[in-house]
Amino acid sequence: MTNLQIVSIRARSASLLPFVTGLAAVLWVLLLFERFGAAGLRVVAHGDAAAWQALAVQGVAAIPEVFYLLALDGVRRALAEFARGQLYAPTMTRMLDRIGVVLAAGAFIGVFVVPGMQRALGAGPGYWIAFDVSGFVLGALGLLLTVIARVFGRAAALEAELDEIF
């Protein structure tokens, strides 16, 4: 990679970092307001068991979304590392693995855990497993990112071995 390419990647990462940081902040605020605004007001206004149940159901529904926002935070951290000039295998491997695991976990929880937990709270959607195409796709992409991270890690190890030989 040429010096010009490295400078270009660093500059692009530095310019994207404020956008991704702002996006993450806005999405966290929207998640809190959307998921807990009405249910929280209902708890404050009434405080009955039904209000607390609605708040708990919204909390369960928010679990996968929290994982997805944590993955976005992983992207933000990676952009910050790229902007500092850390462009090589250890940074890429950590970033891809972290984001992949978080995306896969969020998708797994959204598809397999949330419906059961909502049912246990008495507000079940009527099914045990959510047929959510986006959840399946995000889960598959998350698993793919972890595999790519292992490939990068192995390639870095092989490169280090070759550097020692030559």
Image: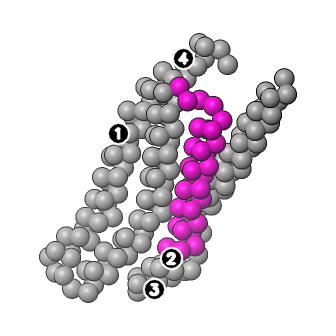
Cα–Cα span, label 3 and label 4 = 53 Å
What amino acid does circle 3 point to?
Ala
Under circle 2, the secondary element is helix
Q: CA distance from mark 3 to mark 1?
A: 36 Å
Q: Does 77 sit above or below residue 103?
A: above
Numbered disc 1: secondary structure: helix
Residue at x 59% of width, y 12% of height? 4
Left or right, 151 with reference to 146: right
Q: Which residue is mark 3?
A: 120
Kindly identify which residue carries mark 4: 7
Query: Visible in this render: residue 109?
Result: yes
Start-end of magenta stretch: 85-114
Callout 1 amino acid: Gly
Is 99 magenta? The answer is yes
Is there any visible trace of residue 138 in the rendered image? no
For disc 2, the neighbor class at 10 Å (few under 14, some 14 to 19, many from 20) is many
Residue in front for this viewpoint, 61 or 10: 10
Marked residue nearer the N-terminal end (4 or 1): 4
Q: Looking at the picture, does residue 110 appear above or below residue 120?
A: above
Residue identified by numbered label 2: 115
Q: Residue at x 54, y 17 (%)?
A: 7
Are circles 4 and 1 on residues that touch, CB within 8 Å? no
